[in-house]
């Protein structure tokens, strides 16, 4: 009962003094903002460890005012994590500096700032929203480059497919030519075999003809010799 009564007295006191209610609301808003900032910091993959400036602010200050050129990744890293005496505020600062040399600054912004414009921690003050615009422009360039690379890769893939198809056609032509050569060689072998057969048959016929002629000549000479023998056996006195 005492606690309920005390709470009622406090509520009456707050109603009686509006400034106390405003202070409570301000405290609640500050606490809510602090909790939100803590949650945002917990989501960061890389936070600022030196000073109170965000990485986007540091990069914007290092940007060339005349040419508009952004600083390199190594310059931003050194300005963010290297102290005045040359030491690093993070244990692996120098190693990360070396490893980050080949990483474009746009990729670091994508990791640190996120993808939703003007709604990510690390954007800095509202007065430098040009950083967000530049980030979007750079991201658009990256997307365009990726699309261009994808288109080029598609062309390369198509060319490779055409090359493979042409190689397949050439292979088939080679196989067809090889088969034709085999068939032609087989036909030549068959013709040569037939020619040898015909030549052998012609030789046999010629030999048989020659044999017949020899036999006939032998018979003829035999008869001729016989007739000459009979004639010579007759004497002239036999005619008288």
Image (cartoon, rainbow, N blue to C red):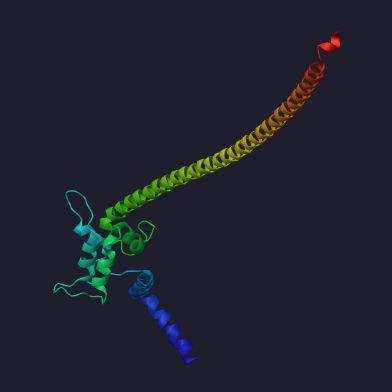
| x 34%, y 76%: residue | 20
Position of 219 relative to 176 (above/below): above
Place of residue 139 in the rendered image (x, y in percent of width and height, measured from the top left): 35, 52
Dividing the picture into quadrants, the one containing residue 226 is top right
Position of 43 relative to 127 (above/below): below
Position of 120 relative to 218 (above/below): below
Place of residue 37 in the rendered image (x, y in percent of width and height, measured from the top left): 35, 70
Place of residue 171 in the rendered image (x, y in percent of width and height, measured from the top left): 54, 43
Q: Quadrant of the C terminus?
A: top right
| x 29%, y 52%: residue | 134
Place of residue 193 in the rendered image (x, y in percent of width and height, measured from the top left): 66, 36
Total numbered labels? 0
Q: Depth check: 117 or 2 in front? A: 117
Side (left or right) of 106 relative to 72: right
Q: Depth check: 85 or 228 in front? A: 228
Q: Is residue 185 visible?
A: yes
Q: Depth check: 190 or 237 in front? A: 237
Q: Residue furthest left?
A: 85
Dividing the picture into quadrants, the one containing residue 219 is top right
Position of 14 relative to 52 (above/below): below
Q: Residue furthest top?
A: 240
Q: Depth check: 92 or 28 in front? A: 92
Q: Is residue 51 visible?
A: no
Q: Residue furthest bottom?
A: 2
């Amino acid at each position: 009962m005492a606690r309920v009564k005390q709470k009622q007295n406090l509520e009456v006191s707050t109603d009686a003094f509006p400034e106390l209610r405003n202070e409570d609301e301000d405290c609640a808003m500050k606490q809510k903002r602090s909790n939100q900032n803590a949650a945002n910091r917990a989501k960061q993959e890389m936070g600022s460890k030196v000073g109170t400036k965000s990485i986007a602010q540091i990069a914007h200050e290092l940007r060339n005012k005349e040419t508009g050129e952004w600083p390199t990744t190594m310059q931003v890293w050194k300005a963010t994590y290297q102290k005045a005496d040359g030491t690093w505020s993070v244990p692996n600062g120098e190693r990360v500096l070396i490893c980050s040399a080949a990483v474009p600054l746009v990729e670091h912004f994508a990791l640190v700032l996120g993808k939703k414009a003007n709604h990510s921690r690390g954007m800095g003050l509202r007065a430098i929203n040009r950083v967000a615009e530049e980030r979007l422009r750079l991201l658009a360039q990256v997307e365009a480059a990726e699309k261009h690379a994808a288109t080029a890769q598609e062309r390369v893939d198509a060319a490779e497919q055409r090359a493979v198809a042409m190689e397949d056609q050439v292979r088939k032509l080679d196989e067809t030519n090889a088969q034709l050569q085999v068939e032609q060689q087989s036909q030549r072998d068959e013709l040569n075999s037939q020619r040898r057969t015909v030549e052998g048959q012609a030789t046999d016929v010629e030999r048989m003809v020659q044999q017949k002629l020899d036999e006939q000549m032998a018979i003829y000479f035999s008869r001729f010799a016989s007739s000459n023998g009979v004639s010579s056996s007759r004497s002239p006195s036999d005619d008288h």
